[in-house]
Amino acid sequence: MTDEFEDVWRRDRGRVLDVAYRMLGSITDAEEAVQEAFLRLARQGLGGVTDARGWLITTTARICLDRLRAEKARSEYVGPWLPEPVVDLPGGGPDPADRITMDDTVRMALLIMLESLSPAERTAFVLHDVFGLSFAEVGEVVGRTPAACRQLASRARRHLHGRPVSRPRFEVDSAVRRRVAERFAAACRNGNLDELVAVLDPDVTGEFDSAGLIPGAPLAAVTGADEVARTLATAFIGVPAVFEVVDVNAAPGVLVRLGSRVVTVISLEISGDHVAVLHAIGNPAKLSRLNRPAEP
């Protein structure tokens, strides 16, 4: 690897990974797409490339778009499919929160909504609305005219209810969100059903991504404070688990450990002083990165 190529890798890899993760919702798949883009650049050489970052973003976006178009596994997924979480671990660790820009565009709620878009709409929205590429540049990725790409992005915005991507779904002070997350973690830790109900919005919705691999895990969304609390109690009461408040996809959430192993990551959407939506990821494949030994 030449010094020039190493400079490009160090300078641009994070930005390209940002694009890939928002397009795919999977850190593992995003890193594979970025790796493939850099391999293509290495084969081509930097000599004829005037803008390495732009070339890498365009190439990575094409790779991601091809994956989205070919993706069939999610339609066959058992139970809810949720994005692979990015966790900001205290003291650092194997999760790439230090390499992926943590802002409102990685909020779990937005990534889940992006799943409802067509591959072309998602690509246009992410590249233009999130990363500021022109519609001409988007057209190079999706193979359509700039005008058609403008329409793709417009349809995506309408589908997402016109909510500005820079604003979270629930406007709550960060200190308040943290306190609510601490109350939620304490209620789970204490195994207190009444405390759990009290911290949940009466109309709370909860879903659990287990890929059908965890016996007893709900395979459909659970609604209502009593039902969600009972589901959580069934999963965790009597289990010697540790509940730790951490940032999950740029918002307070809870990391659940059994011994040294992470068994669940819970992303919380908070409205006022209650949990309005919770997304729990327990699929072992999506937590494998968190359970890797830290690199020396």
Image (tube, grey):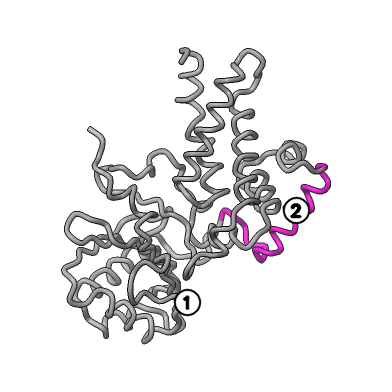
* Residue 129 horizontal/vertical position (percent): 65, 48
Q: Earlier in the sequence, mark 2 or mark 1?
A: 2
User: How many numbered marks are there?
Assistant: 2
Q: Is residue 148 magenta?
A: yes
* Residue 60 horizontal/vertical position (percent): 59, 36
Mark 2 to mark 1 CA distance (whole Å): 30 Å
Query: Which residue is located at x 45 percent, y 25 percent?
Result: 10
**Closer to the camera in the image, 72 or 174:** 72
**Closer to the camera in the image, 176 or 15:** 15
Residue type, label 1:
Ala
Q: Is residue 205 magenta?
A: no
Query: Which residue is located at x 69 percent, y 48 percent?
Result: 124
Query: Which residue is located at x 25 percent, y 74 percent?
Result: 236
Bounds of the magenta segment: 145-166
Q: Is residue 94 left or right of residue 172?
A: left
Q: Which mark is on residue 220?
A: 1
Q: State the image quarter where residue 72 is shown.
A: bottom right
Nearer the observer, disc 2 or disc 1? 1
Q: Which mark is on residue 292?
A: none
Q: Is residue 35 left or right of residue 187?
A: right
Which residue position is annotated with label 2?
Answer: 152
Q: Main secondary structure of the magenta part?
A: helix
* Residue 91 horizontal/vertical position (percent): 24, 44
Q: Name the quadrant of the C terminus.
A: top left
Query: Which residue is located at x 36 percent, y 74 percent?
Result: 217
Give the SS element for disc 2. helix
* Residue 223 horizontal/vertical position (percent): 45, 82
Q: Residues within 10 Å of mark 1 (few under 14, many from 20)?
A: few
**Closer to the camera in the image, 186 or 156:** 156
Residue type, label 2:
Leu
Residue 131, relative to residue 242: is it above or below? above
Residue 161, relative to residue 153: is it above or below? below
